[in-house]
Image (cartoon, rainbow, N blue to C red):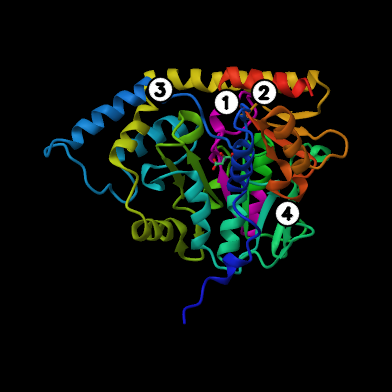
């Protein structure tokens, strides 16, 4: 008789965004005449930029001709894309990252969920709280999180580093020493960030205690302030303690195309074992590469035309962020984020719980957001709105919220 992976059974409920989608579906089925505005999941709404569309068309045509057809992609991804990444994302920022340290993938979600596989199951994981649920759930599936307490909504074997209004959403170094530290900067869900000096502190700390930082930089293109790091490799010493994960979803609208990459520097070792070699082994065994046409689309993101068009797209979403932030502030809400990230993190009114606020907003304003508690216990009493809607829907949602 077969046995199942018991760690899956320890997982609470369903994936956060699946739970929300089910709740919204139930509401729309019961109220077919109501126009629901979705500012919940951070999914983009603007079409793919013209320069990228052109590259996609060209790549599709290449696939129709035997002389230009492409089958399996190279293990790490095509050199043309890895080279564009180094030339644009790393070299101009003084980061010493080489093409063969970049692994192209189908997105940051898969990489941030899968990367834990190369670490021992006894490794102690530290996460900021609230946190993107994938980091914890993936470790729980691997049996690294202990048991889940439904009352405190925490795992017994995870170090939680609260990021709340009181500490300016900047995590403190934990009392207990972690082995793996997940940092997402600019942060999902709070939309807040830390300075380069603060990140340098984390790099120094990780090097000192022998921990690895798993750094999710999916939102770096939304940074508007000068002192915020775009990459952890801007910090001295990061090559010996950090893995960086990037996405094309938020900067270029690839949520439906799927493309991302992970950087594993060759200086990152455990004794004599190279983490780069381990991830290469894992990648080569379990993954056959992002499609050629999508990697060509990714290359177009870095052309002059592509960069200009995408800068406009990011500005479009940040205009939404500004609108939400100011509108909520004017209505008397306490609001955070939205300056270096496309997320606005608001306090729920009075003592209202975040799921209660979710239900109330859906019921009375037909606006969908994400309850802070869904991201961890320190998210209770907060609520997330995304700036990825259309401008019209964003303005309409705000009007409805303000009229409550
Ligand atoms: C979010 O809403 O937090 C993100 O869209 C999730 C993701 O990027 O996977």
- The reply to whether dot 2 and dot 4 touch (C-beta < 8 Å) is no
Q: Which residue is mark 4?
A: 160
Q: Which labelled disc corresponds to residue 49? A: 3
Q: Is mark 1 within 8 Å of ligand 1?
A: no
Precedes in sequence: disc 3 or disc 1 = 3
**Which is nearer the eye, 228 or 251?**
251
Range covered by the magenta-colored residues = 204-233
User: What whole-number distance in Å separates the C-alpha atoms at marks 2 and 1?
Assistant: 10 Å
Q: Is mark 4 within 8 Å of ligand 1?
A: no
Precedes in sequence: disc 2 or disc 3 = 3
Question: Which callout, 2 or 1, points to the residue nearer the camera?
Answer: 2
Q: Is residue 215 magenta?
A: yes
- The reply to whether dot 1 and dot 4 touch (C-beta < 8 Å) is no
Which residue is pictured at 69% across the width and 47% down the height? 374
* 120 left or right of 322 in image: left
Query: Outermost residue, right direction?
Result: 350
Q: Which residue is mark 2?
A: 397
Q: Quadrant of residue 36?
A: top right
- The reply to whether dot 2 and dot 1 touch (C-beta < 8 Å) is yes
Q: Is residue 209 magenta?
A: yes
Q: Which labelled disc corresponds to residue 389? A: 1
| Mark 3: few/some/many CA within 10 Å (<14, 14-19, 20+) | many
Question: Which callout, 2 or 3, points to the residue nearer the camera?
Answer: 2
């Amino acid at each position: 008789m077969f046995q199942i992976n018991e760690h899956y059974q320890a997982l609470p409920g369903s994936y956060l965004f699946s739970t929300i989608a089910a709740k919204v579906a139930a509401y729309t089925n019961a109220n077919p005449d109501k126009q629901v505005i979705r500012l919940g999941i951070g999914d983009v709404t603007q079409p793919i930029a013209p320069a990228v569309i052109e590259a996609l068309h060209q790549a599709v045509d290449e696939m129709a001709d035997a002389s230009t057809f492409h089958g399996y992609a190279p293990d790490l991804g095509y050199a043309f894309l890895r080279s564009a990444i180094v030339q644009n994302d790393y070299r101009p920022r003084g980061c010493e990252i080489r093409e063969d340290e970049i692994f192209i993938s189908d997105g940051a979600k898969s990489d941030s969920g899968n990367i834990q596989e190369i670490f021992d199951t006894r490794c102690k994981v530290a996460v900021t709280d609230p946190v993107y649920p994938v980091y914890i759930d993936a470790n729980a599936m691997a049996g690294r999180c202990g048991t889940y307490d439904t009352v405190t909504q925490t795992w017994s074997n995870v170090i939680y580093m609260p990021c709340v209004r009181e500490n300016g959403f900047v995590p403190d170094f934990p009392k207990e020493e972690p082995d793996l530290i997940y940092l997402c900067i600019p942060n999902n869900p709070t939309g807040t960030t830390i300075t380069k000096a603060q990140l340098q502190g984390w790099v120094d700390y990780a090097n000192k205690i022998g921990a690895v930082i798993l750094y999710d930089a999916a939102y770096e293109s939304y940074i508007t302030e000068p002192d915020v790091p775009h990459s952890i490799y801007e910090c001295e010493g990061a090559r010996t303690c950090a893995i960086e994960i990037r996405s094309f979803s938020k900067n270029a609208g690839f949520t439906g195309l799927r493309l991302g990459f992970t950087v594993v520097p060759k200086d990152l070792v455990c004794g004599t074992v190279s983490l780069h070699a381990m991830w290469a082994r894992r990648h080569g065994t379990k993954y056959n590469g992002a499609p050629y046409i999508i990697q060509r689309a990714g290359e177009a993101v870095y052309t002059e035309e592509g960069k200009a068009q995408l800068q406009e797209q990011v500005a479009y979403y940040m205009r939404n962020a500004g609108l939400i932030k100011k509108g909520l502030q004017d209505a008397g809400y306490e609001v955070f984020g939205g300056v270096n990230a496309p997320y606005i993190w608001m306090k729920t009114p009075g003592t209202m719980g975040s799921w209660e606020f979710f239900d109330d907003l859906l019921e009375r304003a037909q606006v969908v957001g994400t309850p802070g508690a869904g991201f961890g216990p320190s998210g209770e009493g907060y609520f997330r709105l995304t700036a990825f809607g259309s401008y019209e829907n964003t303005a309409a949602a705000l009007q409805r919220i303000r009229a409550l």
